[in-house]
Image (spheres, helix red, strand yellow):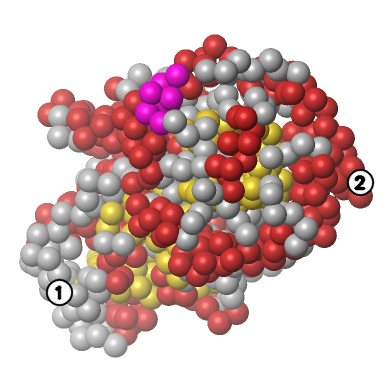
Amino acid sequence: MSRISTVFERLRAAERKALIPYVTAGDPDIGSSLDILHAMVSSGADILEIGVPFSDPIADGPVIQRAGERALKNGVGLVDVLSLVRSFRLTNSETAVVLMGYANPIEAMGRERFIAAAAQAGVDGLIVVDYPPEESAEFAAAVRAAGLDLIFLLAPTSTRARIEQVARLASGYIYYVSLAGVTGAGHLDLADVLSHLEVIREFTTIPVGVGFGIRDGATARAICSIADAAIIGSRIIQEVEADPAHAAARVGHFLADVRAAMDAVVTTAP
Amino acid sequence: MNDRPATYDLPDARGHFGPYGGIFVAETLVHALDELAMAYARYRTDPEFVAELKDEFAHFVGRPSPIYHARRWSEVLGGAQIYFKREDLNHTGAHKINNTIGQAMLARRMGKPRVIAETGAGQHGVATATVAARYGMSCVVYMGSEDIKRQASNVYRMKLLGATVSPVESGSRTLKDALNEAMRDWATNVADTFYIIGTVAGPHPYPMMVRDFQAIIGQECIEQMPQMVGRQPDYVVACVGGGSNAMGIFHPYIPFPDVQLVGVEAAGEGIDTGRHSASLSAGTPGVLHGNRTYLLQNSDGQIIETHSISAGLDYPGVGPEHAWLKDSARASYESATDSEALEAFHTCCRLEGIIPALESSHALAYAARLARDLPRDKVILVNLSGRGDKDMPTVAERSGMVV
């Protein structure tokens, strides 16, 4: 069983939901990124999404784009992100790690070479934002063969046919983008999210995490009343931006509050 | 290289030109692209749509654009005869309007009252603002703040036409960043918004759709050249940034094996200086802006900043069909530097009484180089894709003047 599945099993047994924070590697610098990852774990993160900087992040909003620009200014690329994961794994073998990024840096390294390096570094899952299912059948097979999960995004605009297609290829968890648009935008409509989660669950039993628009304990708690995981991105980058010198402490403090709010949920067994 | 297929029918249903093209976008855009592909499939052959487009081309754009024999320049070069396809004479001064008319007509049929666009030189932004005014649509044009400085008069034209010009401050603040921003807008506002992409790049169906609307250029040439010179040209030459004017004139000529197709990229300060925009000549395949194509990128797969004296060629990718035409050897790709383009610009002004766009001047520079070494009975057809009025400040600055 993959580390991601193990994490969800453990949580299910404990009647808790998964907290999945996102941080861009190399922002404010690669050393701080390692501290941030450990701080997130201490504050109750179950799975870490690590953003791979890319020069043209078309699916991200301004907050995550700025983080990527700062990381690129520091010269942080895919190779550095893999070493970051290796460093993290020196002292942590339980928390699942997912790399999230765009296709081009992966293709520049070579897909096979990247997958092997990611597995060897201790990565558990991949989200390649601009690899939709039609373009990633071969990639998905290679990822699975290496024992990694390939995580796909679904959106409010995804049709039933599309959800079925994604459900066939996806493993680990499904990342439901709760809003149309880019990361860090807008507000959350819980009833609308719920209706979409119900459709997704017709086609798959793997956990569904919800991201885009979760900004505090209250929104995370609300999401966790209907989803398997709360995914938080832009809001964490804002903590990093607000005080780069103390980024790890700020992120840790913020997430601890979110965790506490989430655990206040009374989960009912299905 | 590969033998050419007898019939050319690319792309496939998912937008592939061999290994290039495709749909590489986040899930949030998939439905919008499906909806667009379905609408385009429905209307591209719809008699009422085709008739309206033809009418708009004739009465609003001013088509067909003439072909002009550059006699004096050909004489001075002493070799092949150079002809210009006069896309500079279109309404708004460039080929861009051919495509924006088509997409705006599609937007109306899809019930989208708001159009958005990205622009580099501002020509596509002006062409989009123009059709938005023509059809009473609201219009937002994304433009890199660097380009806004370089192309002030086009910014003013867009505003006169009622468009909002939204400056883009991210990345290199040029065309690619404007494209990123427009994609984000579209993902957020897809319910009421149509994204008019200006070149043959982006995810399927854009490369195909933009090519089809621009193909009127080559279709007219195929009719006009026999009337002008009694036959088709030996060479068709066009500048390539994203590559829409080149695809427009190349595509109808693909089945003519005796016609050589030559795209001319911007070599900037020289390919070996690294300051250029020649993706096909100096790039490697990768994924950007929704499709797989040749890109200017570093070893980490980050897109690198490009340079060209002409904002319209300053793009690190290129349309995927050009990538395919290059690999299959049906077209060849050359380059011209900033200085060569400027020299051709001045020569064209003085010898022919035509002020060409700096973009088109790259094609002219290569055509002049080519013509010199060819016999006098050879025929080179250059796509003069736009007029140079917008480039006055850039050219004047190079000559140490201010206009």
| Image x and y of residue B122, in percent | 52, 46
Give the amino acid at mark 1.
Asp
Q: Is residue A9 above or below residue B310?
A: above
Where is residue B227? Give x, y as percent: 10, 59
Q: Eyeballing the image, is A186 above or below A182?
A: above
Which residue does the numbered mark 2 point to in the structure image?
A246
Q: Which mark is residue A182?
A: none
What chain does badge 2 belong to? A
- Amino acid identity at mark 2: His
Question: Which quadrant is the C terminus of chain B positioned in?
Answer: bottom right
On the rendered structure, is A231 left or right of A126?
A: right
Residue appearing at x 55%, y 78% in the figure:
B270
Task: Estimate how packed mark 1 is, as few (under 14), some (14 to 19) or many (20 or more) residues with alpha carbons within 10 Å.
Answer: few
Which residue in the structure is indicated by mark 1? Answer: B3
Q: Is residue B14 above or below residue A203?
A: below
Q: Which residues are magenta?
A: A198-204
Q: Nearer the viewer, mark 1 or mark 2?
A: 2
Residue depicted at x 59% and y 48%: A3
The kind of secondary structure element at disc 2 is helix
